[in-house]
Amino acid sequence: MIFSLLLAALPVLAQTCDNYGYTNGSSCACPPGYGGPTCSTPACGGNLFQGAARPLVQGSPGNVSSCACQSGWGGIGCNVCQTANACQSSYNAVYPSSASSSSGSISGIDPNQLNNSTITCSTVPRVWAASELSCAAINPTLQAVFPRSSYLNIHRTLDPASSLYPFGQNGTAVAQLIYDGVEQFACSGTQCTQSNPDEFTSDWNCASLQCNCRTGTQFCGGGGALNLQSTINGLSGSLQITCKNTTCAFKQALLDSLFGANGLALSSCTYGECVRQGVIDAALGHTEAAAVSAGNGLSGGVIAGLAVVGVIVAAVIVLFVWGWVCQRQAKRMGGAGGLGDEKVGGVGLEWRDVRYVIGGGKRAWPLGLRKRKGGMDTDDPKVLLKGIDGRADAGNLVAILGPSGAGKTTFVELLAGKEKVGRMTGSVEFHRIDGGIVERPRIGFVDQTDVLPATLTVREALLTAARLRLPERISDEDKQARVFEVIEQLGLGDHADSRIGNSERRGLSGGQMRRVSIGLELVAKPDVLILDEPTSGLDSVSAANVAQVLSDLAHDPKNPTLVIASIHQPSSHLYHMFDQIMVLSRGELLYYGPGGVAPAHHFAARGLPCKEGYNVADHLLDIAFAPPPGTVDSRTDSEGNIFIPAAVPGDLEKGASRGSGSGSHEGVVGVPSLGKIRHYKSAPNGGTEVGSGALVRPPSYATTFFTQVQVLSGREWKNLRRDKSLFLAHTILASILGVFCGGLYYHTGIDIAGFQSRVGCLFFLGSLLAFSSLSALYNLVEIRPLFLRERAGHYYRPSAWLLCRVAFDIIPLRIVPTLIVSTITYWMAGLSPHAAAFFKFLLVLVLYVLSITLFNFLLAAIFSNGGIAILISSLYNLYAMTYAGFFVHLGSIPPVLRWLQWLDVLKYCLEALSVNEVGSGLQIEDTLAGVPINISAQFIMNLVSPPLLVPYFIFSFIF
């Protein structure tokens, strides 16, 4: 009886299970992917849910090379799930009742104990319950002995109770190495723990390792170049399996000594785990709770980023408060006096021996060359003014006559204190009626061209000038009253609320525009008003109206003001409105004295009579065009050379006495000495330099920086609100191009061609935004003349203007269209669906647009010619596209030119967008020549650059 029982139990005692399966009664419980009586036969096709019913490889030894996987399954042996649909359908096929019920008949898990029983496929390195991974074992040492393909499959079990196909115990790992389609050896790790530094990293540390070599295989005495059976069977100690993205390492002390510090390196790893979503949710919930309880959930990078943002926000708040405080202090400074408390006008002007020359500097040219024009050295000095003397008191209207090239514009600009590139000598001084010196005169200067804000009304333009040029202590009500007074003074009451307009959108007439230009100076209550050809381009009626305004201003009994104007060709009526006349010819003074017929009498006495009934102004211009010898007040030395004395007080005092000396012309007003004067002397750099005895200092800004930003922001907002053409054009075109680009790359796939399309889509967006930013350059070139006029008039600081210009150009015309075209394209093209990746995508493009826009601003500031600036910007965009790595491999560029890539903003933009796209877990799935490919795009991008070469690398990698 006892003997019979022993015979019956003998088969069970003799039963052994390969691949670290374990006995389950009279049979073996095999690890996933293996079957047969002893778990030695690999599965071929099918899926993990089929268990013992799964088809196996036929023949011995079992070769899995010819096995075809079901749709949604991959890896060597078809154990790695690829899609959630594959897991769900395979589970439903084995357990049909699960199609209508969330509960299944799998032992070890109760689906109802978790919130979400939906089955999904997790493809990250982290293990939730039990996961499969399949990697290529590529190592030079290994391949030198065994040159064919080697793969390592690993089944890791963390919590079999939560697994849909439970095997083994908690914290175990079973691995099989497959060479040329045949299993060579298997290893088992026990007492394993898992750590996850981040979402795409998993580290398994096993305290105990044992391996078993399959006798008769290539690695284990089956005819291979080397018999590793004793070595493999002797592997023991601890085991570490580290995985990050698509690379893993199988580390053990002996393997580390054979293959390097990282042990057996594994690449092209694919992960797959069919698991209920509730298991993942539960694990993530515990992790988040632990992080919160530990109190260190924020990484150092996040904390640093938040700190930087906090500092920036705090700095903006501090600057805002500081600006507001400075504004309040400026408004309280000087008491509560209004405009009526200020004395304006009553200031005269005196100039002595004013000479001006350009060229003649010792400017060095490259390679010692000197620029020549027409065979002559252009650095030869050219004298534009030759010793001009004169004086004009408050309440006078002075006209400066002369043909083109006589030096009228140069002379009035010097009187107004404009910066010039040439060298000036002589003196210019402002004085009051009682002879007192004026240290800071308020000079109004009106250029001969009308540069006005086209979208503003007359009242708004004048009020903007008043708010910027009148002191802070003057209330806004007084400034508005001053604007109303100037409008009435200019006769613009009927057009006060009419937009100024420009050549494209008609608004005011030419004469009205000229009066507005004068009004922009009058609102600041100038002591002296200087105008350059205020009647040029106007008809006789408009010119007379402008002259009448100037006459009324000069002869105002309360505030008599000196008005000096250069006049090109006045009519007889216009000529007789001026109190004093100055006639210039080729930079020399012919006459300066009373107006009317006095100039005609002066030249008649010198044999140049005026015909009866002939316009005196025309007669003077005829004389000035070709003055007879002896008419010009010539100042030359004995050799006939032009003499420019050094600007020292003694010389200037001597020159001042010429007006009353014997050398002066009859009828020319004498210039008495007034003591201290303002000198100019030749500067070392060829510019105009004010001597130490200057009484007139450069005027400071009337308002604070905060007020300037406020006023300019209001004007920019009005411009944007009234001229919507550019904003609408950008917005509409952004929407159209977004739909076009999204349709062009609609629902891009994840195969090789799809990856090319993804990179192409990113490159297309970068190039599109670069060329659309050209409008910023044109915009700045168009508004440049207005900025130069206002800057010369000390309306505001350039930094205040730039801040407002950037804010009201970048936000509505750059950022908003960028967000529109990027959002439409992103979701139509089917890029990464993760919210974090989307917002990073927008951030990168916005920063890129900011950099390109500021670069275009720089070009517009450097080049006054808009055509040159646009040409350079376009060439830069072509260079950027070339060095972005899309058209040419950067490594193939000669080293002498390769360094230019580091100046390419588009290169950084494309790299950031590509990393953002593939870093979200993009897998390239395709078939090349019948060979299935499933590889991480991020892994390939770590090996090759630029991204466009990824498909070619994959092809060479496979074949």
Image: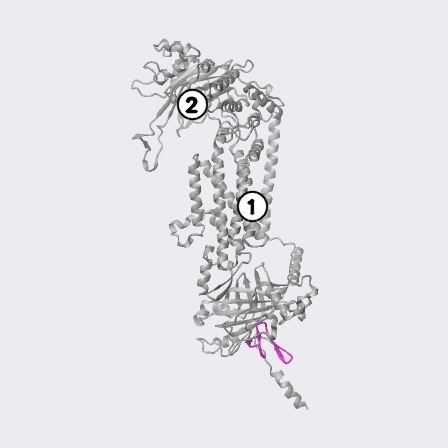
Q: Which residue reaches farthest right?
A: 113
Mark 2 lies on residue: 409
**Does the magenta-highlighted stretch encompass residue 25?**
yes
* Residue 95, quarter of picture: bottom right
User: Residue 822 location, x and y as percent?
Assistant: 54, 48
> Does 572 sit above or below residue 878?
above
User: Residue 773 location, x and y as percent?
Assistant: 49, 42
Identify the disc placed on residue 820. Answer: 1
The stretch in magenta equals 22-41
User: Callout 1, which amino acid?
Assistant: Ile
Using a 10 Å C-alpha cutoff, classify the residue at mark 2 as few (fewer than 14 neighbours), some (14 to 19) or many (20 or more). Answer: many
Marks 2 and 1: which is nearer the front? Answer: 1
Q: Residue at x 29, y 19 (%)?
A: 639
Quadrant, the C terminus: bottom left
**Does the magenta-highlighted stretch encompass residue 483?**
no
Q: Residue at x 55, y 56 (%)?
A: 920
Left or right relative to 586: residue 235: right
Q: Is residue 220 visible?
A: yes
Left or right relative to 878: residue 476: right
Using a 10 Å C-alpha cutoff, classify the residue at mark 1 as few (fewer than 14 neighbours), some (14 to 19) or many (20 or more). Answer: many
Mark 1 secondary-structure assignment: helix
Q: Is residue 657 visible?
A: no
